[in-house]
Amino acid sequence: MMLALARSPSSGWSTIVALPNSEFDAGERDLALALGVAGSVLLAMGPSWHSM
């Protein structure tokens, strides 16, 4: 399991992203798809954090 943690200094919120190791062993197309979906979700959530 690969984990990444980020904390915003301005809001104090933390974000954790976890991917199983099998995602890193997958082909380039599968990995690009997984990263694209994860990035799209994070971008979609981004503007909503400013309204809180």
Image: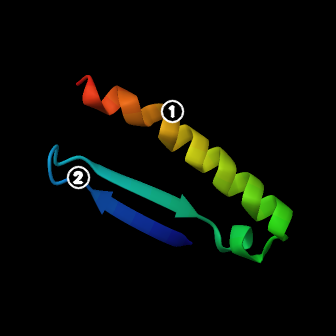
Task: Give the amino acid at mark 1.
Answer: Ala
| Residue 15 place in picture, x, y as percent | 36, 52
The part of the image, by quadrant, that contains residue 37 is top right
Residue plotted at (67% across, 50% down): 36
Q: Which mark is residue 44?
A: 1
Q: How many marks?
A: 2
Compared across the picture, whether 32 is left or right of 9 comes to right
Q: Against 20, is 11 above or below?
A: above
Quarter-wise, where is residue 48 in the image?
top left
Q: Is residue 44 above or below residue 2?
A: above
Name which residue lies at 44% across and 33% down: 45
How packed mark 1 is, by other alpha carbons closer than 10 Å (few <14, some 14-19, many 20 or more), is few
Residue ID at (59%, 41%): 40
| Residue at left offset 31%, top offset 32% | 49
Q: Which residue is mark 2?
A: 8
Q: Residues within 10 Å of mark 2 (few under 14, many from 20)?
A: few
Give the secondary structure at mark 1.
helix
Look at the numbered discs 2 and 1 and tell me whether their residues touch, using CB distance below 8 Å.
no
As drawn, 42 above or below 8:
above
Q: Position of residue 9 (x, y in %)?
A: 16, 54
In which quadrant is the C terminus drawn? top left
Is 40 drawn above or below residue 18 in the view shown?
A: above
**Which of the two discs, 2 and 1, labels the residue nearer the N terminus?**
2
Name the one closer to the observer, 8 or 15: 8
> What secondary structure is marked by label 2?
loop
Q: CA distance from mark 2 to mark 1?
A: 17 Å
Q: Amino acid at mark 2?
A: Ser
* Residue 38 x/y as whole percent: 59, 48
